[in-house]
Image (cartoon, coloured by chain):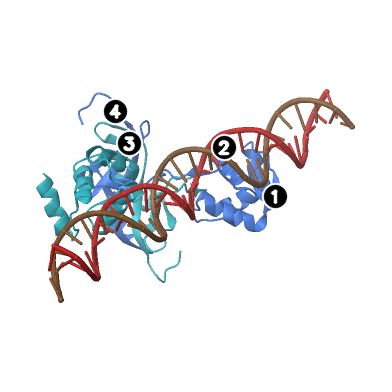
Chain colours: A cyan, B blue, C brown, D red
Amino acid sequence: MTHDVMTVLQEHGIQPSAQRVAVAEYVLHTDEHPSADTVWKEVQRRLPQISRATVYNTLNLFVEKGLLRELEFAAGIAVFDSNLERHHHFIDEDSGRIYDLPWSALTVSHVEKLEGYEVHDYQVVVRGRRAPRRKR
Amino acid sequence: MTHDVMTVLQEHGIQPSAQRVAVAEYVLHTDEHPSADTVWKEVQRRLPQISRATVYNTLNLFVEKGLLRELEFAAGIAVFDSNLERHHHFIDEDSGRIYDLPWSALTVSHVEKLEGYEVHDYQVVVRGRRAPRRKR
DNA sequence: TCTACGTTTAGACGAATTCTAAACTCGTTC
DNA sequence: GAACGAGTTTAGAATTCGTCTAAACGTAGA
């Protein structure tokens, strides 16, 4: 298991220190979606002396190296929307800006009958770049 | 314009103070999706003495009164995902927990040919409740 | 005018995250 | 094997976003 993780790190060009292995071990073997602080607390149970900064650095490194993804829609700050109609969202990867997409622009199938889930609402989050020279 | 906004506030049962009008004016007439702090900074340009707490209170009041929506996917904390395969997400409204939905569970149509946008990635974000008594 | 209630304010507070500078590790060179 | 240097980790300070508090303020109605 530990060995696996070391290989994965190396394959991504990450020097496998003890701390990084411990973080990777936790983060790659959970199907939860832990926050950075949760990762810190969990990893501390195995490696009590690990510092918070290391965990944050490591997670950011993993994201940078493609080992992990930061959840696209976890913006980190509260964002407000004066458009009360249902609509989807487009996130510009360059600027981080969020644009509205009309509800009718996209269609999602099967969403109401998801097995095991009671659906109250949904939307599509699209990421990319606003194409140049097009009227808005 | 100011008059418009005052009417809107009153229609939502909000006492229209100078500060609230200024916030409403900015927030209802932008198609950006400003963060609370951005709103504060913008409104300060018109009303330099306005305090941060007022802006936050006002925004929350507007959300409560249905004038504004807080963006559903702004989780407030960075969350990481070790599942690098494409997948959708389900957010449990009770617990705030995030679950993965297999990519094949949902289909989105028209997304690749969105006019004016260069699409790199997309996903569906579903909110609701996990249905009781179902195997995961 | 007086009262009462709602509103605004500055600043303290707290949580999440980043920054900084020093200390540590470890492989390489002399 | 001592000295070096690059990379890594550390504690704690700093920053940022957001909430809370208590006092001051404003204003509508008796």
Q: Amino acid at mark 1?
A: His
Is residue A71 in sight in this rendering? no
Q: Earlier in the sequence, mark 4 or mark 1?
A: 1
Q: Which image quadrant for residue B100?
A: top left
Q: Quadrant of the N terminus of chain A?
A: top left
- Nearer mark to the viewer, of 1 and 3: 3
Residue B131 has which mark?
4
Label 4: chain?
B
Q: Amino acid at mark 2?
A: Lys
Which residue is pictured at 57% across the width and 37% down the height? B65
To which residue does mark 2 refer?
B65
Q: Earlier in the sequence, mark 1 or mark 3?
A: 1
To which residue does mark 3 refer?
B97
Label 2: chain?
B
Q: Position of residue B95 (x, y in %)?
A: 35, 32
Q: CA distance from mark 2 to mark 3?
A: 26 Å
